[in-house]
Amino acid sequence: MSTIAKQNQNEGIRALPILISFLIAGFIGLFSETALNMALGGLMKEFGVLSSTVQWLTTGYLLTLGILIPISALLIQTFSTRQLFVTSLLFSILGTIVAALAPVFGILLLGRVIQAIGTGILIPLMFNTILLIFPIHKRGTIMGLMGLVMMVAPAIGPALSGLIIEKLSWNWIFWVTLPFLALALFVGIKYVQNVSTLTKPKFDSLSIGLSTIGFGGVVYGFSIAGEKGWGSTLVIATIVIGIVALALFSVRQLKMETPMLDLRAFKYPMFTLGVFSVFVTFMVILSSMILLPLYLQTGLGLAALTAGLVLLPGGVVNGIMSPITGRLFDKYGPKGLVTPGFIIMVIMLWNLSNVTTATSLLTIILLHSFLMIGVSLVMMPAQTNGLNQLPRELYPDGTALLNTLQQVSGAIGTAVAITIMSVSQAIHLEGVKDPSTPLAISESLTAGVQTSFIFGLTLAIVGLISSIFMKSSRSV
């Protein structure tokens, strides 16, 4: 499409109200992703379920996203921006109400899945819309604002939910988000315009089936590995089936004239490198978000509210840094941000792998805050630089691939971290005379957390090496 055509297409589009609508909705959607982490212990008692069951409130959410987001490129090219935005909000609102009123665990899980459907539609739509309505020289700043939403929302989830649990009940974690979802829906109905070009591609049921089995199988397999063990037939079978389905899906997409998900986006090296950087970083983020609350509550014996408040400064710092890194990206490109970001992550993860039951809260706050600074220097610059290299017609596919692999990486990172922690904890307890004492439990869990952070450290080192090859998309 010519520059003049693009300008004509964007005339009359009110970019700021559209951005605000998406940011409000996106904040609540991503807040919901980690908001229940602090309530899992209480929910196990209330509903009489095991830890392996209650974790599905988080992993089920990720699984739904992993299945739905790959289809988003097809949806974006079939339905208007307004239709998808309103639909995503209606699913989010319905899921929130169902979860808040849930009398049994199964209904609560159903509410979470419905919520995830709303988020799964919204997040790729938000990325695609931003790419269409803002010029390339402003995208760093806008993506920085999106980074504020996407990183702060899950970061403050544990702190806010800890406060809610302390003062009210877990149901209010859902009730407090409802007015914001209603506000986003109202603003969206009034201001969101149709900005995408509808090509109405043919629905290919085989591609959708292979995508669902592929991404769903991989996420499911890694999600149950902590409970069933890596030697489990079910774990191995679901992961293998998922990988085979993804291979068949990829071959089919490359042979189709109009693919459901255009994998040719990976022909662009900075996009591929950006996806890899985000994949690695999101594994670190999600694994840290589950390890630190466990360490603070079981290892150090903190209450849910206190543990949430310890993690809050990191979320705030990340929120402050995201717009700053966005502006720096617009001015200097990704090179001077991504590599230093990974260096900071490596240093902080090394220190986190050495925490003990005697480590001070101030130390944890500082390590977590600097880890979040490193994350903010990597996530949005790598993401934006990668998407900038894509031609306009590949935006829906690029955002779908980026967000799908992000969710898959989150599920894998969480599962591997928990598995490493559990194995290390069990090994530590083998040498203890009475493994049931509170001291033995806290020390063994801390030992497990130390080992799991070494896994995160390894990921960050790999990311650091890959960042050396990153260039600005404008100079490629």
Image: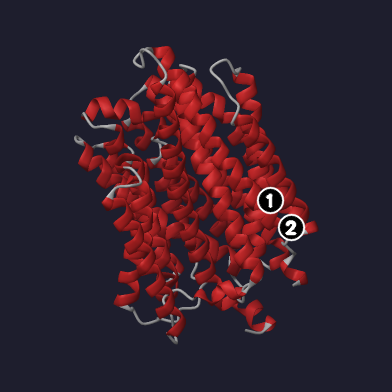
Whether pointer 2 and pointer 1 mark residues with C-beta atoms closer than 8 Å, the reply is yes
Viewer-nearest residue: 163 or 133 = 163
Viewer-nearest residue: 426 or 32 = 426
Q: Quadrant of the C terminus?
A: bottom right
Return the residue at label 2.
468
Q: Residue at x 44, y 55 (%)?
A: 408
Viewer-nearest residue: 359 or 333 = 359
Element type at marker 1? helix
Element type at marker 2? loop
Residue 427: percent from left, percent from top:
42, 28
Q: Residue at x 57, y 72 (%)?
A: 266
> To which quarter of the image does residue 352 belong?
top right
Crowd around label 2: few <14 · some 14–19 · many ≥20 (10 Å): few
Give amino acid for label 1: Leu
Compared to residue 475, the image places residue 93 above or below, namely above
Can residue 437 be seen in this snapshot? yes
Residue 118: percent from left, percent from top:
37, 55
> To which quarter of the image does residue 179 belong?
top left
Res. 197 mark? none
Residue 434: percent from left, percent from top:
35, 13
Return the residue at label 1.
464
Compared to residue 374, the image places residue 245 above or below, namely below
